[in-house]
Amino acid sequence: MSAFGRLDRLPRLRLGHAPTPLEHMRQLEGRFSGLTLLVKRDDCNGLAFGGNKVRQLEYYFGEAQAAGADTILITGAIQSNFVRLAAAAANQNGMHCHIQLEERVAKSDPLYRESGNVLLDRMLGATLHSYPEGEDEAGADANLEAIADDLRAQGRHPYVIHLAPGHPPLGALGYVEAARELAGQLAGEGLSLDEIVVPSGSGNTHGGILFGLRAAGIGARVTGICVRRDAALQTPRIARRCQQIADLLEVDNPVTDSDVILDDSFLAPGYGRLNDATRHAISTAARCEALILDPVYTGKTMAGFLDRAAKSSADRTMVFIHTGGTPAVFAYGADLAAHNA
């Protein structure tokens, strides 16, 4: 059996444009002499502003479609990219979508609560629900199940995309596949990979790409930049996610404990909150490479990428995974405007 096991046999509904571009960041390469710096443009994969969740949703929607679901339920932060894209995918496939928005970030300004992804959720016609906690994954999932029970009583066939650990990590499979895609692109350019820098939040993107690279026989360093939890909490989460992927694919786990590398230097003051390094990274990416990054995920990840590049020796190839999140820029307009005046 292939190291990817039954990846190609699991239900999958194609939602995005693939392969996504792999581009050189020429202006940044000029700042870091001797480094090859690339960006994997998963912000360019279509579907309502795109982003990394498109790949993840393909496997959830594949299972939902196979189960005959007519309604999707999902939970996330108020400015969640995941819920926005779930609503978009539901529309494309003739399904209803119920979105639960959690209070993860202590922001009450109108831009944050009504613009960005929230505006798109409403434009997409999703039914919105609220959940008062921001760090209660099990409770958020339980509330989704209660909503699903009400929908079943009305004769609908709901499918719940769970957030908490303990459920098969179907979303992570999107980034196992992305790692295989990236390996082919690098080989096509005759490049060997030394390091990938990726956001680490739910663990699906980080765990999936780490697993996929190891399954493809690529031993490059994978640096996860913490965007929600500190490294002490996130490290076992990623290790568990990789084992869950192996169990789901029915293969041996190619990821070792030493493969799981987390950096929480850019996390403070917390999830969805800006710091000076993130502001600088957002500005640098925009003015050097015309890359639009968000304050929650990609801005912090670029801060980590620039730090890793500064510490790297010459003749190395590094890849930044651009996971999208563009609409959130508008929700953080007040925070970003002063820095970019």
Image (tube, helix red, strand yellow):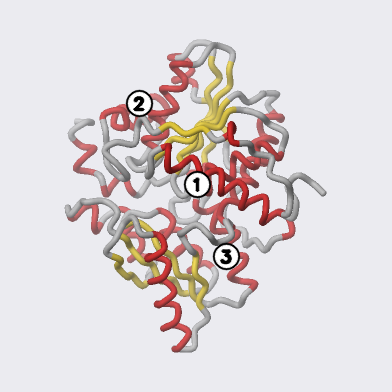
Q: Sequence-wise, which precedes: disc 3 or disc 2?
A: 3
Is residue 23 visible in the rendered structure shown here? no
Q: CA distance from mark 3 to mark 1?
A: 24 Å
SS at mark 2?
A: helix
The quarter of the picture where the C terminus appears is top left
Q: Sequence-wise, which precedes: disc 3 or disc 1?
A: 3
273 horizontally vs 54: left or right = left
Q: Nearer the viewer, mark 3 or mark 2?
A: 3
99 horizontally vs 187: left or right = left
**Which residue matches tag 1?**
237
SS at mark 3?
A: helix
The amino acid at mark 3 is Phe
Q: CA distance from mark 3 to mark 2?
A: 36 Å
Looking at the image, which residue is at 47% across and 50% down? 50
**Which residue matches tag 3?**
61
Is residue 45 visible in the rendered structure shown here? yes
The amino acid at mark 1 is Arg
Q: CA distance from mark 2 to mark 1?
A: 31 Å
Q: Sequence-wise, which precedes: disc 2 or disc 1?
A: 1
Which percent across, then down, holds residue 272? 30, 45
Please, which residue is most extreme toward the right here? Answer: 1
Looking at the image, which residue is at 34% across and 36% down? 267
Which percent across, then down, holds residue 75? 40, 63
Seen in the picture, residue 152 relative to 161 is either above or below; the reply is below
